[in-house]
Amino acid sequence: MRLVNVLSLQSWVSYGHVGNAAAMFPLQRLGAEVWAVHTVQFSNHTGYGDWAGNVFDGAAISALVSGIARRGVLPACDAVLSGYLGGMDIGKAVLDAVRQVKKANPRALYCCDPVIGDEGGVYVRAGIPELLRAEVLPAADIATPNVFELSRLTDCTCTTLAAAKQAVTHLQAVGPRTVLVSSLRTEATPPDALDLLVGEDGTFYLLRTPLLPVRLNGAGDMLAALFLYHRLQTGGARGALERACSSLFGVIRLTAEKGTGELAMVAAQEELIRPSRHFAADPC
């Protein structure tokens, strides 16, 4: 495996694992260099109802990216990864970072996790979904929405596999060549299972895992990081999906066994390298 460098612009929490705190360790454990730029620094994720910390503005983020650029390393950057956007100015700063990296290295990939919400509703600020659709996703090479976000971005109801595939095609027409959809439940999904769908170059693959009895923040952030890494290494979506999901399932399974409220990624770190269970993705 070759060494890869990833510029990751995401939130940071001191306790728990969301945003960069969910992406950095898995990437580093796999052997990637991570140039992390934190868009917020909180004590813990906001789902606890109480937290301390600060949100950084777009100017602060751009200043950090400019500082990295002055080291002359952007030509060696293989990918940019972004997740939750706390404000419009942060979105603009992320787009500017992507432009700088791609100018320095046209082969670099931009992976956008277009965070909007989930079945519980929308939890981003007004204007962010529109910014994602109009400006951010057109700049992306890879997008990793959950099924709720895919529906919001494409105005498609993804209750069947055929409809989900059509929604992926619509999103690809906006910009990203590769689209990974998580938390997919269709008419063909058994009650005790969960599906993931990836589309790339007109080909689709479906991967099914058992549904584990746990709900965790940060799993989507970790999935995006793992998928990006393996997509860089393998050059294809199918292998990246299989490796990323096998590792993520192992981490979530151990987390469920421990009964912790946060991803047990340190305790389960061997799953990142050698997953205890391998899941295959089938053409669909």
Image (spheres, rainbow, N blue to C red):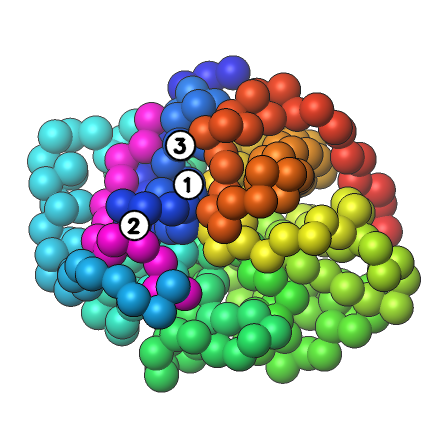
Task: Name the residue furthest top.
Answer: 1
Label 2 and label 3: CA atoms lie apart by 13 Å
Residue 41 in the image: x percent, y percent?
Answer: 21, 53
* Magenta residues (range): 33-47
Q: Dot 1 corresponds to which residue?
A: 23
Q: Under tag 3, what secondary structure?
A: helix
Of tags 2 and 3, the one toward the viewer is 2
Residue 196 in the image: x percent, y percent?
Answer: 71, 52
**Is residue 204 at all visible to an observer of this figure?**
no
- Specify few, some or many for label 1: CA neighbours under 10 Å numbering under 14, 14-19, or 20 or more: many
Asked if the magenta segment contains residue 44, the reply would be yes
Asked if the magenta segment contains residue 93, the reply would be no
Q: Main secondary structure of the magenta part?
A: strand
**Is residue 269 at all visible to an observer of this figure?**
yes
- Specify few, some or many for label 3: CA neighbours under 10 Å numbering under 14, 14-19, or 20 or more: many
Label 3 and label 1: CA atoms lie apart by 6 Å
Q: Which mark is residue 13?
A: 2
Of tags 2 and 1, the one toward the viewer is 2
Q: Under tag 1, what secondary structure?
A: helix
Q: Earlier in the sequence, mark 2 or mark 3?
A: 2
Q: Earlier in the sequence, mark 2 or mark 1?
A: 2
The amino acid type of the residue labelled 2 equals Val
Q: Would residue 79 appear left or right of 154 to someone viewing this image?
A: left
Residue 133 in the image: x percent, y percent?
Answer: 46, 73
Q: Dot 3 corresponds to which residue?
A: 25
Q: Are marks 3 and 1 in contact (CB under 8 Å)?
A: yes
Q: Would residue 226 appear left or right of 36 to someone viewing this image?
A: right
Query: What residue is drawn where x is 56% and y is 61%?
Result: 145
Q: Would residue 200 appear left or right of 112 to someone viewing this image?
A: right
Query: What residue is drawn where x is 21% and y is 29%?
Result: 73
The amino acid type of the residue labelled 1 equals Ala
Q: Would residue 61 appear left or right of 182 to someone viewing this image?
A: left
